[in-house]
Image: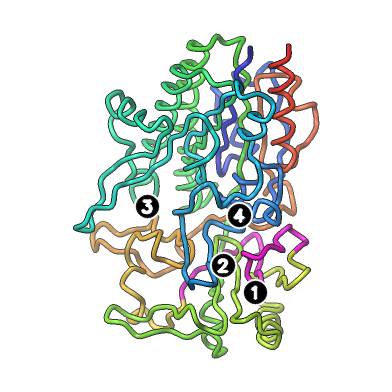
Amino acid sequence: MKHFIYCTIPGLRQQDLAQMPNLQALTANGAQQRLTSSFPAVTWPAQATMLTGQLPNRHGVIGNGFYWRESQEVEMWTAWNEKIESPQIWDLLHDISPELKSLAWFPMLSKGSGADYICMPKPVHNPDGSESLWCYTQPQEYYGDLLEALGHFPLQHFWGPLANIKSSEWILQSAVKAISDFKPQFSYLYIPHLDYAAQKLGPNSPEAQQSVVDLDRVLGETITEVNHALGEDNVVWIIASEYVITEVDHVSYPNRILREAGLLQVTEQEDGEHLDLDSSAWALVDHQFSHIFVKDGCPEIIEQIQTLFADLEGISEVLVGEARGKYGLEHERSGEVILVSTSNSWQAYYWWLDDQQAPGFARTVDIHRKPGYDPVELHFDMATKSIPLDATLIKGSHGAPVSDDSQRGMIVSNCSTILEDRDWLDTELCNHLVQAIAQNQSV
């Protein structure tokens, strides 16, 4: 029986293969094809689309966070699997046979999923405000085995100023152990390493190129160890881009524009100005797009926002109402207005007009309190122990609709037939993999 191992890598580009001898060796007798990511091409929606074959209007994952209108709460990076409203690959495999076991290793919405074996960071929040390292695993006690074999998952290297290859290396080493221990028919591995330097310094920077080399090294070790554990002829590798990171030289500030138009309000607190979620309108920004939430869906304010952002530098589309369906974003969780960036621009969450009035968390690594994604956290200044409030420091971004080959990723395999000698859309992968695994089961 074959074991299918599906790795998704944010930021993996077609040209990166030239610097990846281990990946080249894996696919020498296999296949390489182009892969187009759906909009919005950011982590949570990209993974949900790849795992379900659906767009956000069906799976409900409209960004890397959610705004819950009834409770006026923003949820960033903490959601569990129930937020995905469509069956995932492991659910579809279980429908075929309960004996088809799946492993979910670090996809971001995997906690509580139907996968048989799971690992995902879940630090313990202590009463004194500190955190203790820990991971959610299935089986529950399995993190103890990983801890004994590998030590704690290095969360400090997963995001922020210390983000580096150590987190992806631990993910892959622990995945090797789990695959060897459980021998699932399907494994999904999320490997984040190329996400860091490419955003911080640009996808063509020397640091980003070095990250490709570093990733290939740990991939090569993983491939060798898994093939040894399962038998090289028994493993089908599929390695895919989640999205491509493009160079950016411009940044937009939707919340500042809304504030200057009198639509966004702030509350004065001891540590600065905080966003008032009861504002007439505010934007939950996410790389190269944002959801603007309009109080009570007021038609006049929606029209005003359309006018505000029409023909604005860095904004390519302003989507309202049914027009959001162009990208499958006509979902109740979506904002009434969606702003789409040009490929050379991205959107920052800042709402303050004077840096002296920025809220305290703005200068810290705080992915949960910020109502929007903040890649400037990668530029944390060790000397001042703070984040500079300069969004122009970011040189790479992603999420915008794919409009040319520079934004198109790739999918590769050691199997010469599984990719059918054609280009792929990310929405096609789920059903294709389920069918391939099911056919293998029946052989």
Give the camera-side residue of 291 and 99. 99
Q: Which residue is mark 4?
A: 61
Task: Name the quadrant of the C terminus.
Answer: top right
**Residue 374, located in which quarter of the rendered image?**
bottom left
Mark nearer the viewer, 4 or 2:
4
Query: Please, what is the three-letter code of the amino acid marked with disc 3?
Result: Gly
Q: Which residue is mark 2?
A: 250
Query: Please, what is the three-letter code of the amino acid marked with disc 1?
Result: Glu
Q: Residue at x 71, y 78 (%)?
A: 311
Q: Position of residue 132 (x, y in %)?
A: 25, 46
Name the residue furthest left: 128
Query: How packed is label 2: few (under 14 Cα within 10 Å), some, or many (20 or more)?
Result: some
Q: Which residue is mark 3?
A: 160
Q: Position of residue 107 (x, y in %)?
A: 51, 41
Q: Position of residue 277 (x, y in %)?
A: 48, 78
Mark nearer the viewer, 1 or 4:
4
Query: How packed is label 3: few (under 14 Cα within 10 Å), some, or many (20 or more)?
Result: many
Mark nearer the viewer, 1 or 3:
3
Q: CA distance from mark 4 to mark 2?
A: 27 Å
Whether the residues at callouts 1 and 2 have beta carbons within 8 Å, the answer is yes
Q: Secondary structure at mark 4?
A: loop
Mark nearer the viewer, 2 or 3:
3
**First-in-chain label (2 vs 3):** 3
Residue segment shown in magenta: 325-350
Q: CA distance from mark 2 to mark 3?
A: 22 Å
Residue 11 in sight: yes
Q: Residue at x 46, y 47 (%)?
A: 197
Q: Secondary structure at mark 2?
A: strand
